[in-house]
Structure formats: structure tokens, C-alpha cells
Image (cartoon, rainbow, N blue to C red):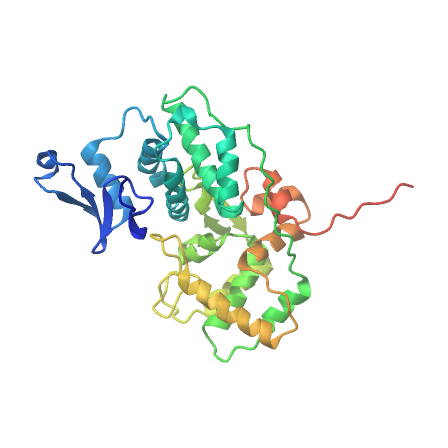
């Protein structure tokens, strides 16, 4: 019986190890000559680097037969083309999938196995996200000619997770904006300026934190939504209004350093969004500190998230079409189902 893998190595391809801050490939006996004569070959310090080196060395499997081999190719060819945050989520999802299905033949997977997997994993959001990744991998398997048809697409019915319904009331925004700042620059005023811009534009967190002075042009705010950068590349221009100009000017004024090219920046003048990790840890910390004061010093008693502000923008738009355009959604159904959170008023029959 094979020895159980260490926790840090679970979910990695066969013969991979993570040690001393890097990923290594344990070269099979007799194949050392193709791996620079080494028994243990260093692939790279990060997973993306390791997968790339591995792919360059061994080439992509021509005809995957097992789900493990399919996931390997999926991680090599498909995942690197996704957004950084999505790549991270996919890698997390693949680990439990590989642990369960790695040796299963592509033709042996059935819908009942998907139900069993979700049940064993607790039926939460995480297991559903994992199955979404597996499903997309099988879609690619059809495209690559491994199988003739998807084995479970359209064959399983899962109860979808409920959309968030929290609607931020106008008075709650007033309370947040009335929070007194102890300094002329910095966190409180920066978050308040961010809230104002967010409510007027509905821009995503990453798009807002990436804004620089060059995005602020004569006719409006020019930017390419992060969601479309690697697909359509469609650009957007949010036209100026008096309120938006005022909100942006406030954001510029309260920056801790006026020489920064970013509209929202830290004390060093750097932007908050990390393009490598896809996270904005500094800004998230700023938001948590701000909201802790909101809950302690204002009449707001129910927490709301930064993302709820995007939903408020969509909810307050007069029409679904306007809301969908602001949120840069290709499908207005998503806007309506997830982001339009105000109750719908209907006239009675007369």
C-alpha cells in the first residue's frame, strides 16, 4: 500500500513534492538523463512556475485516460489563462478532486458519483465550486478529443446557493460618511471617498483600486474591467456628473501622498491591488478597521460588505439596463438575480 502523502503535497501531481520553499519532481529511476542527471528536479518556487517548467519538460499528455491526467492538462493549459484570483481558487478546488478521482477512468465517471462527492464534502459552496471546475475540465476533454460527450453536464440538479439579499439603506451610508476622521488624510477619509465613488459607478473592487490619474480623462473615467481584460478587452467610460467629479476630487485630496499616480494609495504612494496574488490585503485591512468604528460609533447595527455597495448601486439604478451597464455585465439576468435587491413594487388590479 503506498505511503500517505504529507499534507503540503496532497493535490499535487504524482511524484511532486513541496519542500524548502519550492516544488520538486522525484525523477523515476532510469530517467535521470532527461532531467539533467538529477534524481530530484527543482521545478520552481511557485505553482505557476512549476507547472510551466514541468509542461516544457514532459510535454502535455496527448491522450489523457484518467481524471488525474485530465486535471493535470487542465492546470497546465487552461488555468494559467484565467485571472489570478480564479487561478488560486481553481488550484484549491483541484486538490480534493484529485484526491478522490485521480485514478478514475474518464469513461467511468457517472452523475451519481458527483452527488456522492458533494454529499461527502458536506454539500457546501466549496464542493459546488469544485464540481464546477471538474465540469469545465470535462468540457475541455470533449474539445481535446479525449471523450465524445460530457458525462454529467445537464444530468445533475443541485439546489443553488441563495443570492445575498442585504440592501444598504441610504441612512446607513449617511452614518458611514458622518464618521469623524482623526486625521486630515488616510484611512477613514479614504474609505469614505471610496464609498462615494463606488455608489456612483458600481465599479468592482479591483477596478477601483487600479484607477490612476491617467484614467481620469476629460469626458469621464476610462478603464477596462478586470473581468474582460483577458476576453473581450472591452473598455468602458463612465461619464462625469457633478457628484462623481466631487467624489473623485475628494479621493484625490485625502490621499496620504499627492505624488502617487493612484487614486487610492497607501503611505508609500503604491496602489493597494496586488496583480500577482489578485488580492488587496492592505485595503481589506483598512475596510475592516473602518467598519469596526462604524459598528461601534454609529447607528449601523448590521454589517454590510464592500460588495454590497456594488449591489446598492445596481439596486438604485432606475432601470435594469442601466444597472447592468454600470456593473459591466454581459447578461442582465445576473444583475437582476444577484444585484437588484430592492423590493419590486406592483400596482394592484383596478
Judging depth in this view, the residue of 33 and 249 nearest the camera is: 33
Which x, y percent locates residue 260? Answer: 37, 64
In the picture, residue 319 is in which quadrant?
Answer: top right
- Residue 305 in the image: above or below residue 332: below
- Residue 232 in the image: above or below residue 299: above
Q: Residue at x 52, y 52 (%)?
A: 203
Q: Residue at x 58, y 43 (%)?
A: 325
Judging depth in this view, the residue of 218 and 328 nearest the camera is: 328
Quadrant for the N terminus, please: top left
Total numbered circles: 0
Judging depth in this view, the residue of 287 and 270 nearest the camera is: 287
Residue 264 appears anywhere in the view: no
In this view, the residue farthest toward the top is: 148
Residue 7 appears anywhere in the view: yes
In this view, the residue farthest toward the front is: 1
In the picture, residue 70 is in which quadrant?
Answer: top left
Left or right, 226 with respect to 323, comes to left
Which x, y percent locates residue 82? Answer: 39, 41
In this view, the residue farthest toward the bottom is: 182
Q: Residue at x 39, y 47 (%)?
A: 92
In this view, the residue farthest toward the right is: 350
- Residue 142 in the image: above or below residue 157: above
Quadrant for the C terminus, please: top right
Amino acid at each position: 500500500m503506498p505511503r500517505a502523502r504529507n499534507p503540503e503535497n496532497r493535490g499535487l501531481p504524482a511524484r511532486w513534492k513541496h519542500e524548502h520553499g519550492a516544488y520538486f519532481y522525484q525523477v523515476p529511476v532510469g530517467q535521470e538523463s532527461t532531467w539533467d542527471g538529477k534524481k530530484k528536479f527543482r521545478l520552481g518556487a511557485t505553482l505557476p512556475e512549476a507547472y510551466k517548467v514541468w509542461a516544457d519538460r514532459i510535454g502535455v499528455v496527448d491522450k489523457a485516460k484518467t481524471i488525474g491526467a485530465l486535471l493535470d492538462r487542465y492546470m497546465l493549459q487552461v488555468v494559467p489563462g484565467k485571472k489570478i484570483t480564479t487561478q488560486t481558487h481553481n488550484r484549491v478546488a483541484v486538490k480534493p478532486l484529485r484526491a478522490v478521482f485521480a485514478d478514475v477512468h474518464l469513461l467511468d465517471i457517472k452523475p451519481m458519483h458527483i452527488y456522492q462527492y458533494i454529499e461527502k464534502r458536506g454539500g457546501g459552496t466549496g464542493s459546488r465550486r469544485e464540481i464546477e471546475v471538474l465540469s469545465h475540465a470535462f468540457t475541455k476533454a470533449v474539445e481535446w478529443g479525449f471523450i465524445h460527450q460530457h458525462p454529467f453536464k445537464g444530468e445533475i440538479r443541485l439546489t443553488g446557493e441563495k443570492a445575498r439579499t442585504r440592501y444598504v439603506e441610504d441612512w446607513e451610508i449617511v452614518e458611514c460618511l458622518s464618521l469623524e476622521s482623526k486625521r486630515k488624510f488616510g484611512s477613514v477619509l479614504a474609505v469614505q471617498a471610496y464609498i462615494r465613488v463606488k455608489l456612483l459607478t458600481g465599479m468592482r473592487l479591483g477596478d477601483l483600486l487600479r484607477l490612476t490619474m491617467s484614467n481620469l480623462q476629460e469626458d469621464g473615467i476610462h478603464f477596462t474591467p478586470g473581468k474582460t481584460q483577458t476576453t473581450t478587452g472591452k473598455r468602458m467610460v463612465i461619464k462625469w456628473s457633478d457628484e462623481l467629479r466631487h467624489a473623485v476630487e475628494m479621493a484625490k485630496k485625502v490621499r496620504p501622498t499627492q505624488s502617487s499616480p493612484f487614486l487610492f494609495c497607501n503611505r508609500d504612494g503604491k496602489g493597494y491591488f496586488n496583480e500577482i496574488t489578485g488580492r488587496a490585503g492592505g485595503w481589506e485591512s483598512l475596510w475592516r478597521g473602518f467598519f469596526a468604528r462604524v459598528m461601534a460609533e454609529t447607528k449601523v447595527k448590521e454589517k454590510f460588505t464592500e460588495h454590497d455597495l456594488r449591489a446598492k448601486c445596481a439596486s438604485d439604478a432606475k432601470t435594469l439596463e442601466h444597472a447592468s451597464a454600470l456593473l459591466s455585465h454581459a447578461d442582465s439576468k445576473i444583475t437582476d438575480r444577484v444585484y437588484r435587491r430592492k423590493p419590486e413594487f406592483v400596482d394592484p388590479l383596478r
